[in-house]
Image (cartoon, rainbow, N blue to C red):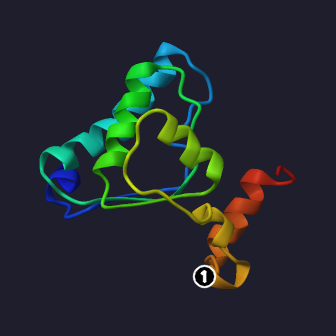
Amino acid sequence: MKEIITSDMLVYISGGYFGERDASLKENLIRFLRYVLIGGVFILRKKPIAIIGVGGGPLKNPILRKSFCKLINSASLVTVRDDETANYFKSYGVKNEMLVTSDTAQIIKQNTLPLLDEVVQRDVKRIFKNKK
């Protein structure tokens, strides 16, 4: 919690924050507490928010949908990964400019990632074996 209070800026990157896997009350509550509440703290403290390369929607819960729209409208910079995301949030009242770029995960290349320590590589291979 200290990091939230002392941070100068909040950055949301790709990761599924702005959509839902299922519309259960539990899932929506967890999503609200993990992602919206932190954004609300930054809005109240008038600290900048950047939303970069996210996809979003659909959000069946109207409270969650309005909360994410408020976050997007409060952000200093918004880029989304596709027209579908931009159109979805525009249809629910987002007025902030949303640039359509790319999902941040799509720009990661093998040669830009640092090599893992040998011990970590062994642990990953041992834990995940032949799994995807």
Q: What's the residue type where badge 1 is placed?
A: Pro
Q: Is residue 56 visible?
A: no
Q: Is residue 20 above or below residue 14?
A: above
Seen in the image, is 132 located left or right of residue 35? right
- Report which residue position mark 1 lands on: 114
Relative to the observer, which residue lies in front, 122 or 73? 73
Left or right, 102 with reference to 11: right
* Above/below status of 130 relative to 99: above
Kindly identify the residue that appears in the image at 57 percent across and 44 percent down.
87
Outermost residue toward the top in this view: 25
Residue under the point 12% across and 50% down: 45
Q: How many marks?
A: 1
In the rendered view, tell whether residue 5 sits above or below residue 77: above
Label 1 neighbour load within 10 Å: few <14, some 14-19, many 20+: few
Q: Position of residue 112 (x, y in %)?
A: 63, 83
Residue 50 visible in the snapshot? yes
Q: Residue at x 64, y 45 (%)?
A: 84
Residue 50 x %, y %: 36, 60
Percent of width and height locating residue 82: 64, 54
The image quarter in which residue 105 lies: bottom right
Seen at 63% across and 79% down, the residue is 113
Instruction: State which quadrant residue 8 falls in.
Output: bottom left
Classify 29 as above or below 128.
above
Of helix, strand and loop, which one carries label 1?
loop
Q: Quadrant of residue 110?
A: bottom right
Residue farthest right in this picture? 130
Q: Nearer the viewer, residue 90 or 123?
A: 90
Residue 23 x/y as whole percent: 57, 19
